[in-house]
Amino acid sequence: MNEPLFDMEDLTVAYDGRKVLDLPRLALDTGRVIALLGANGAGKTTLLDVLAFLLQPTRGTIRFHGEPVEYSTATMVGLRRRVALVPQQPILFTTTVSRNVEFPLKIRKIPRDERRGMVERLLDLVGMSAFIEAKGHRLSGGETQRVAMARALACSPEVILLDEPTSSVDVENQIAIEGIIREINREKGISVVFTTHDMLQASRLAQETVYLFQGRVAETVHENLFSGMMESDSRGNTYCRISESIRFPVATHDRGRVRISIHPDRVLIHDLTAGGMEIDQDALTGKLIQLSDHRGDIRALVDAGVLVSVMVGGDVFKAFPLAIGQTVRLTFPEGSVHIL
C-alpha cells in the first residue's frame, strides 16, 4: 500500500490563542483530486498554506510521502519545489504571458532553447496559447487563473494546490479550469488539492472530499448547513425556516436565528412514482441532480429549492436505483436536523 501524500497527526494552527486548525488525524492520498469543502472561515486556506510548507503548524507532525517534515531552511527549499500553490487571486507580472510562465523555468536554470517549447506546451494545456504575447496584468480573472496554473505547472510539481480556483471567474473559464484540473491529474499524474465551498463542484471533480467545519474535519453530518429563523406552530412543533417556502423540523428550545446541520445518512429519499406515501407537510420535493460514489454508498444531491445531500446505502441503491433528473421527495425524521 502506498504511503499517503500528506499524513498529519495532532496538528494545530493557532493565532492569538485561537485555534483555526485542529486536526487530530488527516491523511490525503497520492495521485488523487481532493476537495477541501467548507464555508468561509472553516480553515481551508490555512490548511493549504500548511500543505504548501508556507506555514509551520503551532504543534503536531506532518509527513510528506511518509517522511517527517522538518521546518529548517534547507529542508523547506527542497519541499517547496515539489509543491505548487495557486492562490485565490494570483498576481501576474506586468510583462507578457510567455515570460510569466517562463519565470520559474529560468529560476531552475532550464536552458533557453528548451524554455520556449515548454512554455508553449503549458499554455496549450490551459487553453491560453493565443495569449502568449499578451500582457499578464491585462487579462481577465479567469484568464489570469489559467496562466497562473500554467506557471505553477512549469515548476514540475508533484502536487498542485488551488485555493478557490473558480470563485471569481465566468462560466466559460470555470468549465475550462475544471477541465484543466482533470487533465493534469489524469494525464500528468499530479496530485491536486483544491478548496471550494461549492458542493456540486466538489462532486464533479474530486475522488475524495474533506469537509472542514470551524477548523476541524467534519463527518458528513456537516454537509448540509443552513441558517434560518426558529418558529413554532400552534401544536408546539418547532422549525427552522430558511426561506419563505422551506422549513426543517428541529426539536430545540433555541429561538431567533440559528445555524443547523442535517445528517445526510438520516434523510429519507422517496421515489414519487412508487405511490403509497403518506403526505408529510415537512417533506421537500426536488430533482435529483447528482449521484456519486462514497466509499461504497451513494451520495445523492437533490435540488429542492436548496441543495440537500443524502446518503443512500449501496445495497439499497442496487435494489431501488435512482436516476439523475428523477423527481424525489425528502423527509426528515426526528434526530436528522441539529442546531450547531
Image (tube, helix red, strand yellow):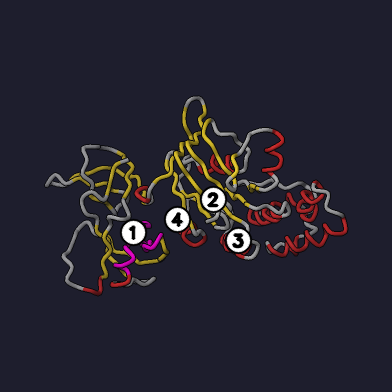
- Which range is magenta? 295-317
Relative to residue 290, is residue 243 drawn left or right? left
Mark 4 and mark 3 residues within 8 Å of each other at the beta carbon: no
Q: Give the Cα separation between the discs numbered 4 and 1.
A: 12 Å
For the residue carrying disc 1, how many other residues have a C-alpha within 10 Å: few (<14), some (14-19), or many (20+)?
many
SS at circle 2: loop
Q: Is residue 142 left or right of residue 244?
A: right
Q: CA distance from mark 2 to mark 3?
A: 16 Å
| Quadrant the C terminus occupies | top left
Task: Measure the C-alpha gap from mark 2 to mark 4.
Answer: 24 Å
Relative depth, front residue between 40 and 83: 83
How crowded pointer 4 is (Cα within 10 Å; few <14, some 14-19, many 20+) is rated as some
Which residue lies under the disc numbered 3? 185
First-in-chain label (4 vs 3): 3
Pinpoint residue 253: horizontal percent, then vertical percent.
Answer: 21, 37
Give the structural element (helix, strand or loop) at label 3.
helix
Callout 2 crowding tier (Cα within 10 Å): few <14, some 14–19, many ≥20? some
Q: Which mark is residue 186?
A: none
N-term-proximal mark, 2 vs 3:
2
Q: What is the secondary structure assignment of the residue under circle 1?
A: strand
Left or right: where 340 falls relative to 135:
left
* Residue hosting label 4: 199
Decide whether residue 310 is among the magenta residues: yes
Residue under numbered circle 1: 310
Q: Amino acid at mark 3?
A: Asn
Could you give the CA–CA distance between mark 4 and mark 3, rounded to whole angstroms? 20 Å
Q: Earlier in the sequence, mark 1 or mark 3?
A: 3
Label of residue 4 in the image: 2
Which amino acid, by three-letter code, is at mark 4?
A: Met
